[in-house]
Every structure is written in structure tokens, then in C-alpha cells.
Image: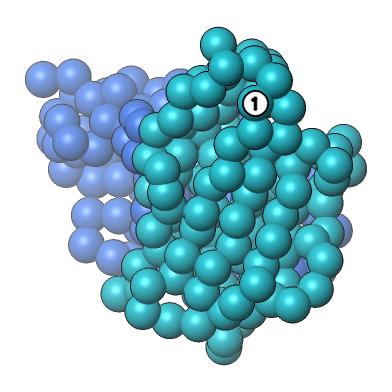
Amino acid sequence: GQSLEQPSEVTAVEGAIVQINCTYQTSGFYGLSWYQQHDGGAPTFLSYNALDGLEETGRFSSFLSRSDSYGYLLLQELQMKDSASYFCAVRDDADKLIFGTGTRLQVFP
Amino acid sequence: GAVVSQHPSRVICKSGTSVKIECRSLDFQATTMFWYRQFPKKSLMLMATSNEGSKATYEQGVEKDKFLINHASLTLSTLTVTSAHPEDSSFYICSARDLEGYEQYFGPGTRLTVT
């Protein structure tokens, strides 16, 4: 079967840096995406990695290692508004976007 | 950016009734739309993939006769939950892929509560 595993919860304080890991096992791989979802809201796209390495977008960076079937989302200079759930997602060979188990991030003052 | 809308945003219905949820791509055409279900504090689970003008493809374990999907145009897909029961209460999210097939955009979701 297909699986994308993430830690269930991460906590940090404002201004800190936090890393959310994602290990995946899917039938086919066409890139790793990251989404943010606030309670009751829709997922919003954060970043995408098709190739190995680091992609940086403002305070958020995402890393991919295809040989390790592993990626992470790095959030810097944490703000209270970053408290949300974060999901990794893989587009598989059936052209479907499969979501990870999700990580709930709580940022404290 | 591309916008996907869903209607209604919230619905409460009685057990045994049917509920229709609409998903529209407002400023782009979508040949493929996806329906996800999300239980509280859980991940998004893909229910089905719908392609304009053809039958939807359902994921394993999703009852096609219970969750009717229609994708009649390039901008509209509907999900009908038939004979709803309390265990169908969930957050239903649609997603649309543009004609280039690369970007996937999400709707705001519909909160269904079956009493």
C-alpha cells in the first residue's frame, strides 16, 4: 500500500525554527508537495520539490531526497499564525495526490 | 490565482436524506476534479477522481452508489451523499486540476453533519 508518514504533533515557540519530516512509500513519485491547513479551512499550497535538494520560499523551505524517500518542511522565524496542520503529499503514478498523515504544529508565545 | 468554490459550506441533514455538494472552478477549466473526505484531526483521504464527461473512479472502500459523483462540465462537479447516516458526517473537500494538468487547487470544503 501507499503511505506517507509524518510526526503527529510538533510544538515550538515564536521565533524558533521547526522541521517537519515526511517519509513516503508510494506507487510512483512525481514530486513532493507541502500544504498548510488551519482548522476548518482548506489546504493551501506551500511548496513543491520535484528534484533532490532544498527549495526556499520566504520563511518556508522544503527538502527532498528521492533516494531516501524522505523530505522535510522547515519553518523559520515561527509566528503564532503558523499554528496549523501541515501535510506532505505525493503525486503517484495514477496521477493522484496522496496526502500524508499530517503534523499539527502549535506555536507558543 | 485559480479559485475553486464549494456550496454549501455547511449543511446539516437528517439521517436517511440525500445531500448534494457542488464544486466549481471559477476562473479556469478543469478536466479532472477530486473529492476528499477528512475526519477531525485526520488527513485528507481521496474518495474519487472525476473526469469531465466520464464516470468517476472511486478509491477502494468508497461506495459508488452512496457517493454519487457527476462531472457534467469543465467547471462543475457534484458529490451527492445518498441516504446519509451520522457516520457520513465529515469535511468534504474538492480539488480541481487545470487543463495543463500540473496545478491542483482546493475548494474551501463543506462541513456535513448528519443527525
Q: Residue at x 60, y 77 (%)?
A: B73
The quadrant holding residue B88 is top right
* Residue A35 position within the rendered picture, expressed as x and y whole percent measured from the top left: 44, 50
Above or below, A1 relative to A51: above
Above or below: residue A2 compared with residue B98: above
Q: Left or right: where does residue B112 sit relative to residue A83?
A: right
Residue at the limit of the structure toward the front, as seen here: B17
| Left or right placement of residue B39 versus residue B80 in this view | left
Specify the quadrant of the image occupied by residue B97.
Answer: bottom right
- Vertical position of residue A69 compared to residue A96: above or below: above
Chain that appears blue: A
Chain B: colour as depicted: cyan
Task: Residue at 41% x, 43% y: name it.
Answer: B8
Task: Give the left or right position of residue A82, taking residue B52 as reference.
Answer: left
The residue lying toward the viewer, choosing from A50 and B8, is B8
Label 1 Cα neighbours within 10 Å, binned few <14 / some 14-19 / many ≥20: few
User: Where residue A79 sits in the image (x, y, percent)?
Assistant: 15, 36
Q: Is residue B115 left or right of residue B82?
A: left
Report the residue that reaches farthest toward the bottom: B100
Give the residue type that dot 1 points to. Answer: Thr
Q: Position of residue B47 (x, y in %)?
A: 72, 45
Q: What secondary structure is found at the residue carrying circle 1?
A: loop
Q: Chain of mark 1?
A: B
Residue occupying the point 24% across, 46% down: A76
Q: Disc 1 marks which residue?
A: B17
Q: For this rendering, which residue is in front, B48 or B43?
A: B48
The image shows residue A98 at horizontal and vertical percentages of 67, 51
Image quadrant holding the C terminus of chain A, namely top left
Q: Say if residue A49 shows up in the picture.
A: no
Of residues A10 and B71, which is closer to you in this image?
B71
Q: Quadrant of the N terminus of chain A?
A: top right
